[in-house]
Amino acid sequence: MQDIKKVIVKVPQAYLDFINQIFEIEKKANNLKEENSIQRNINKMKGIMEEEFFKGSSTIGLTYHNPLGEDYTDTRTDCEATISGTGVENLEIVEVIKPIIYYSYLDSDKVMKVIVQPAVVIVQSKNS
């Protein structure tokens, strides 16, 4: 039987706001014709966020995930969803307002992840 360990993590709101801004810039950059130069800067900011914010601690850092296009069910705990349209079955994430943010740390030489911000998403039935 596997032991379940409850982990509570307090991440400064400024860090979450910073990550959300990087995510917004990345979404907007994807709509530009010359996104490569902007994407390079975004990747540098993500590297700082993932590797430098908690340097010198047992923490690996903060990462985020964009769940756009993924399936959605009401049992999913990493997203807070608003349903668009009338269908409520066979749902897909069609828009991401905020990404899933993870806090990664080492526990007995294993990398563990904790959700510190669930995604805020809009979902729609694939049947529509």
Image (cartoon, rainbow, N blue to C red):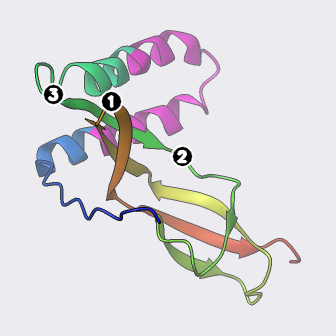
SS assignment at label 1: loop
- Amino acid, disc 2: Asn
Question: Spatial distance from mark 3 to mark 1, Cα to Cα?
Answer: 17 Å
Task: Give residue 3's position: percent from left, percent from top.
Answer: 36, 63
Quadrant where the C terminus sits is bottom right
Q: Earlier in the sequence, mark 2 or mark 3?
A: 3
Residue 109: numbered disc: 1
Residue 66: numbered disc: 2
SS assignment at label 3: loop
Answer few, some or many: residues within 10 Å of disc 3's Cα (few below 14, many 20 plus, some between 14 and 19).
some
Q: Residue at x 65, y 20 (%)?
A: 33
Q: Is residue 102 above or below residue 94?
A: above
Q: Are marks 2 and 3 in contact (CB under 8 Å)?
A: no
Q: Residue at x 18, y 41 (%)?
A: 15
| In front: label 3 or label 1 | 1
- Amino acid, disc 1: Asp
Q: Which contiguous range is marked in magenta?
A: 19-43
Q: Residue at x 43, y 18 (%)?
A: 43
| In front: label 2 or label 1 | 1
- Amino acid, disc 3: Phe
Residue 24 drawn in magenta: yes
Task: Give residue 31's position: percent from left, percent from top.
Answer: 61, 33
Q: Which residue is mark 3?
A: 54
Answer few, some or many: residues within 10 Å of disc 1's Cα (few below 14, many 20 plus, some between 14 and 19).
few
